Amino acid sequence: MIDDCHKFYEYAIVEKIMPLIEYTTFDISLEEKKELISSLSQTASKITGIPLEFFTVIIREVSGPDAWGYQGKPLRENPQYNSSSSTD
C-alpha cells in the first residue's frame, strides 16, 4: 500500500490533482464545519488509502430555502418543507 501511496503522490504532483470532497448545506456553525472537514477527510483517507494530506474539502453554504431548488421549485414552495418549517 505504501508503494501505491508513493505512486499516487508522484502522479498527483505531476498532474496537479487532489481528491476533492464537496459538501453543500444551509448555513452551519464553525464547529460543524471543522467536524465535517475532519470526519470527511479521515473517512475518505481510510477508505481509499490516500494520505489525509491530499484531501481538500469545500463546504458550500446555500443562503436559504429560496436559493435551493427541489422538484423544479424553490424549496420554500415545497409542501414538505412548509410542513416541517416554522420560519418565514
Image (cartoon, grey):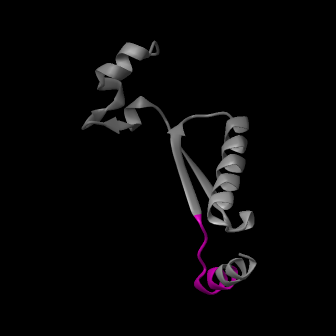
Q: Quadrant of residue 28?
A: top right
Q: Position of residue 57 (x, y in %)?
A: 62, 55
Q: Quadrant of the C terminus?
A: top left
Name the main secondary structure of what is drawn in magenta: helix
- Magenta segment boundaries in residue numbering: 9-19
| Residue 56 magenta | no
Q: Quadrant of residue 75?
A: top left
59 relative position to 42: left or right: left
Q: Quadrant of the N terminus?
A: bottom right
User: At 54% from the left edge and 53% from the top edge, which residue is drawn?
Assistant: 22
Q: Is residue 13 above or below residue 74?
A: below
User: At 34% from the left edge and 21% from the top edge, which residue is drawn?
Assistant: 80
Q: Is residue 13 above or below residue 22?
A: below
Q: Is residue 67 above or below residue 10?
A: above
| Residue 15 magenta | yes
User: At 29% from the left edge and 20% from the top edge, which residue is drawn?
Assistant: 79
Q: Position of residue 15 (x, y in %)?
A: 58, 84
